[in-house]
Image (cartoon, rainbow, N blue to C red):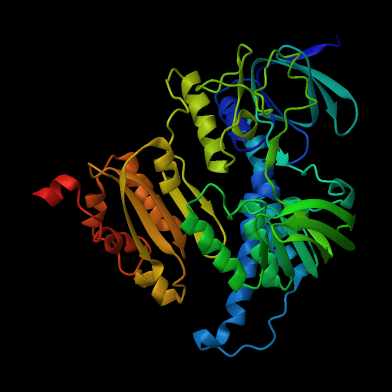
Amino acid sequence: MPDVERYEDLIIGTGESGKNMAWTMAKAGRRTAAIERKLVGGSCPNVACLPSKNIIQSAKVKSFATRAAEFGLDLGSFATNMPGVQRRKRKMVEADYQAHLNLFKASGAELIMGSARFVAPKTVEVSLHDGGTRTIAGDRVFLNLGSRAAIPDVPGVAASQPMTHIEALDLDRVPEHLVVLGGGYVGLELAQAMRRFGSRVTLIHNAPQLANQEDADVGAALLELLRDEGIEVLLETETQRVEGRSGQQIRVHVKDANGERVIEATDLLVAVGRVPNTQSIGLDVAGVQLSPDGHIKVNERLETTAANVWALGDCAGSPHFTHVAFDDFRVVRDNLQGGNRTTTNRLIPFCMFTDPELARVGLNESQAKNLGIEYRVVKIPMAMVFRAVTLGEPRGFLKMLIEKNSDRILGLTAFGVEASEPMATVQTAMLANLPYTALRDAIFTHPTAAEGLTRLLANAPQRASQQAA
């Protein structure tokens, strides 16, 4: 084996978990190397979370422009300028990328650009981007390999060279007719944005409702939203094959309960989930085992099957959110410092950035029923929330689940303008084990989205024992 360079800490991948681990260990005076094959900082600041929200905001401004008369404004032309949309996004991405480089330099961690593959336990060979190889070993190794968009195993899909979110977020043109495969986060967010920019959009989903993991009322509300915006939504529809090339001309053959049809379009976006980047890196050589679904097998402390090797973020099977990856980093960091943190029973919030937002923390009705948990439910339309009324955005609802025989909050689902605000408020209350009555009786600023919680909870049904009394 060539000469081996030894480091105290070796991090593979500089996503949310990896970069924070590298910066923390290097600042603590440990000899630290971080290997990155492509995107310094990971997907989130470069091609995913932040760029997508930037593009979605431009689409929202376009939507507001088309409603100018409703707000008492008289505007001229409001045609989409996609090169301008991209200039705004790229300026943000470039600034963030440079900030990451600066942070690596300031921390003292060595950033190595190249592709790593294990050649022995805790030892990798790195094919450097600028030529040559290096063999590097770490006393401790942290795997932050990330994930990538899944390409469905449907005849002709891969050959059509479809877009994933990465290519869709880098378009300098408005697709004439975009077909979206998938009714989850990415599919819904980008379908709406591209429709607002001026594309004709057809969304194909093989399940009975959009956002499969949510309650039926959420799926119905999302369906109404997309159809109101002029998006053709095909549910319980199987994609059988694709012909042609995305960006030019495609023919999508689909089948539903009514039979078969062909959709002719110009562009194809696949948004059917993600798969971990755990192949072709030699994890077996490192003694790191995988779970049946291809994620790295870890315990509740994110330790792998190899001694002194941890996996964090998407590749470890953690929920695919940046905020979860950051918490993975905190779990491992604190345990290395003598703590005893685990990933068990974490209260993980999420927000889907359609317009309006869908935000949830804790259980929804479907999950509570599956777990056999009895609950009370209280729900109001967003039209009862003064903030939504002042913004002219009354679509949606607030819904809370409360344990049947106590005042414990089980979860909140919010679909509406600024939904992430009441969601974060409820999450804080749940972390503090506050009863729902604490929020019901709180004084929230008027008019904010969080104030809607007082109107929601004023209508909460009493516990059975209270009703009897």
Q: Please state which of residues 282 and 368 is positioned toward the viewer in this rendering.
A: 368
On the rendered structure, is 277 left or right of 411? right
Q: Please state which of residues 364 and 11 is positioned toward the viewer in this rendering.
A: 364
Image spot of residue 351 (x, y percent): 51, 52
Outermost residue toward the left in this view: 469
Image spot of residue 366 (x, y percent): 45, 46
Residue 127 seen in render: yes
Outermost residue toward the front in this view: 258
Residue 247 seen in render: no
On the rendered structure, is 442 left or right of 66? left
> Which residue: 81% across, 29% down?
115
Which quarter of the figure is the N terminus placed in? top right
Q: Quadrant of residue 317?
A: top right
Q: Quadrant of residue 36?
A: top right
On the rendered structure, is 416 left or right of 88? left
Q: Quadrant of residue 461?
A: bottom left
> Which residue: 34% across, 38% down?
373
Q: Please state which of residues 357 and 259 is positioned toward the viewer in this rendering.
A: 259
On the rendered structure, is 255 left or right of 343? right
Q: How many marks?
A: 0
Image spot of residue 180 (x, y percent): 73, 58
Is 20 above or below relative to 434? above
> Which residue: 53% across, 31% down?
328
Image spot of residue 198 (x, y percent): 72, 73
> Which residue: 76% across, 69% down?
82
Outermost residue toward the top in this view: 1
